[in-house]
Amino acid sequence: MKTPSYLQIDADVTLLSAFKTPARARYFFDMRDHDDYEKLREIALWARENTLPMVMLGAGTNCLFAFDVFEGVIIRNRNTGWEEPFEQGGRVLLAVHSGSLSNTVAEKLYTHYRIPTLVPWIGLPGTFGGATIGNAGCFGVEMSDIFVSTEVLDLETGEVHVWEPRDMHYAYRESALKGNARYFVLSTIIDISPRGGEYETYTLENFRSIRRVKQPTGISCGSFFTNTFPTEEQKTSLSEFLTPMGTLSSGRLIDHAGLKWTRVGWVKVSEQHGNFFINDQKWTWQDVLELRDRVKKEIFEKYRVELHEEVRIITN
Ligand SMILES: Cc1cc2nc3c(=O)[nH]c(=O)nc-3n(C[C@H](O)[C@H](O)[C@H](O)COP(=O)(O)OP(=O)(O)OC[C@H]3O[C@@H](n4cnc5c(N)ncnc54)[C@H](O)[C@@H]3O)c2cc1C
C-alpha cells in the first residue's frame, strides 16, 4: 500500500502539545471532520503494514512530546460539533464529537440552553475525546459521573463499537481506553440532567476567576502528577496532605518539600501551584523529564510516596 497522499511528511508539531517543546513528526494527519474517518482507517492500515506507531491527539493539553522526531504517525483530532440535547429514559443526553473542546461545550450548554450541569468545566482545557480517555473533571464533575456511552473506531479491524460504563472501568484519571492505541474515540454521549450540586448556582465568571486564582498562567500541561492513594499508615502519618477525595495531594507534598521554584534549564515548578511545571519559553523535553525525576526522587525520599505522571509522556 502506498503512503496516503494526505499525510504530511516531516511536520512541525511543536505547537500541538501544551508544553510546546520543539518536536517534529515523520507523518502527521490533521483530522477535521467526519469524512476524514475513512482516511483514518486507511492510515491505520498503512501504519500497521509498515509497523509504524500511531498517536492520537486532541488538544494536546495532557501530553509531553519526549522526542525530537516522532518516528510514526501523529493524528490531531479537530472534529468538533454536537447534536441537540435529547431526552431518553427520563434523562437529558448530549452527543458530542470527540474533537470538541470541553470548555466550549460547557459554556454553550449554559449560555444557549441554560443547562448548568457542565458549568464546573468552564475553563477545563482539552477535547471531549481527551476527557473521555482520561476521566477528566473538576469541581465535583468527572467524566465518569456523566458518561453514558462512547463510539470508538477499532483501528485494527476498522469497525465502530459502542462502549458503555461497564466497558470503561473508570477510576481516578483512568479508563480502559487510556494508553490503548487500538481505539480512537469518535464521540461521547453524556447525561446533562440537572445534578443539583452547589456549583450549579455559580456564574461563568465565578469559574473563570477560580481558575485564574488557583492555577498559574504560563505554558504548562496542568497537574503533572496524579494525586496518590495512601496506605493505611500514610492516612495517619500524612493526614495533612489528604484531599477531600482521600488521596494525597501531590501539589501540597511538593510545596511542603520546598520544591516550588525548583528549576532545570527553562522549566520550573510553579511558585503558585506545586503540581504545575511551567515553561519559561525555551524548555526542552529533556529539562521536563529531569525536573520530573528530581521531584519524584525528593518526594519519595521525604515521604515514601511514589508519584505517577498524569501527563502522558509520548516517546518513540
Ligand atoms: C492549565 C491546565 C489545567 C488543567 N486542569 C485540569 C483539570 O482541572 N482537570 C482535569 O481532569 N484535567 C485538567 N487538565 C488536563 C487536560 O485538560 C485534560 O486531561 C484533557 O481532558 C485532555 O484533553 P486533550 O484533548 O488535550 O487530550 P490530549 O492531551 O490530546 O490527549 C490525552 C490522551 O488522550 C488520548 N486521546 C485524545 N483524544 C483521543 C481520541 N479522540 N481517541 C483516542 N485517544 C485520544 C491521547 O492519545 C492521550 O493519551 C489541565 C490541563 C491544563 C493545561
Image (spheres, rainbow, N blue to C red):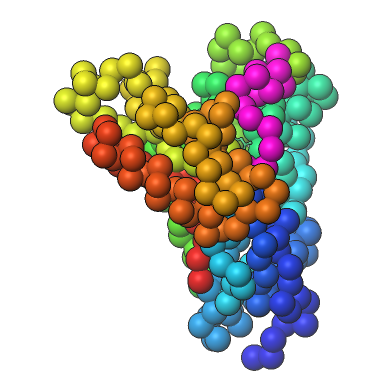
Q: Nearer the viewer, residue 65 or 47?
A: 65
**Residue 262 percent location from the top left of the image:** 49, 39
**Magenta region:** 206-221
- Is 160 located above or below residue 294 in the figure? below
> Which quadrant is home to the N terminus?
bottom right
Q: Is residue 81 left or right of residue 302?
A: right
**Residue 304 percent location from the top left of the image:** 24, 36
Residue 97 belongs to the span the image colors magenta: no
Answer with the quadrant where ligand 1 appears in the image: top right
Question: What residue is drawn where x is 42% and y is 29%?
Answer: 258
Question: What residue is drawn where x is 61% and y is 73%?
Answer: 69
- Is 8 located above or below residue 142 in the figure? below
Q: Nearer the viewer, residue 147 or 204?
A: 204
Res. 239 image quadrant: top left
Name the residue furthest left: 233
Question: What residue is drawn where x is 56% and y is 12%?
Answer: 197
Quick check: can you spot residue 31? yes
Res. 86 image quadrant: top right
Name the residue furthest right: 112
